[in-house]
Image: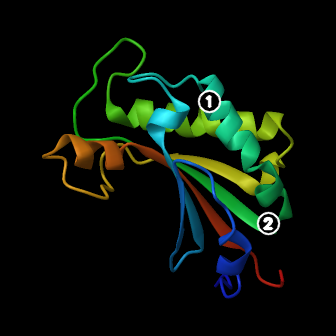
Amino acid sequence: MPRNDGLQPRFQGLNIQGVSVAQGQEGITLRIDDNLLFDSGQAALTLQGQQVLASLKEVLEGFEGTISVEGHTDSIPIATARFPSNWELSSSRAIAVLRYLTEIGITPERMRAVGYAETRPLASNDSQEGRAANRRVELLLKQTLGSP
């Protein structure tokens, strides 16, 4: 079972607009608002998204453990040629983030990409604010046994 004690203090000073930090049972979650990373209905990182991820590089490099890049959507269906459902959209967004993190030097062997579509909402999808909260990419950082 991963040890997560002592993780939170490393991230308390992280002050990046649109990125929040939460301690959970599985590790530390860096939650990034999707509007910082992607245009609506798209999976190509925006320039702003690249800048946000680049600002996390030092923190991610200093972390010893695995990084699960997790894409989430709201419950509004998408049905385009490229994204027949929210599963494809959430997965493609997670992969886009993982690929960019690899490009800036994060070790690919430490990462995985997961798409959850609308299955793990943070808020009700009944309001615009709730749907906005549900559209996100999370970086779940899991410390490996034996790491400080």
Q: Which residue is drawn at 51% across and 76% down?
A: 24
Q: Residue at x 69, y 79 (%)?
A: 9
69 sits to left or right of 72: right
136 sits to left or right of 65: left
Q: Which residue is drawn at 56% across and 48% down?
A: 17
Q: Where is residue 121, by image quadrant?
A: bottom left
Percent coordinates x, y for residue 31 in the rendering: 52, 55
Q: Name the residue under label 1.
A: 48
Q: Is residue 68 above or below residue 4?
A: above
As drawn, the label of residue 63 is: 2
Q: Quadrant of the C terminus?
A: bottom right
In what element is the residue under mark 1?
helix
Percent coordinates x, y for residue 84 in the rendering: 33, 22
The residue closer to the viewer here, 63 or 111, is 63
Q: Which amino acid does label 2 sit on?
A: Phe
61 sits to left or right of 46: right
Q: In which quarter of the image is the N terminus?
A: bottom right
4 sits to left or right of 24: right
In what element is the residue under mark 2?
loop
Q: Give neighbour class at mark 1: few <14, some 14-19, many 20+ (Cα, 10 Å).
A: few
The residue closer to the viewer here, 27 or 85, is 27
- Res. 71 in view: no
Percent coordinates x, y for residue 133 in the rendering: 34, 49
Q: Is residue 144 above or below residue 90?
A: below
Q: Nearer the viewer, mark 1 or mark 2?
A: 1
N-terminal of the pair, mark 1 or mark 2, is 1
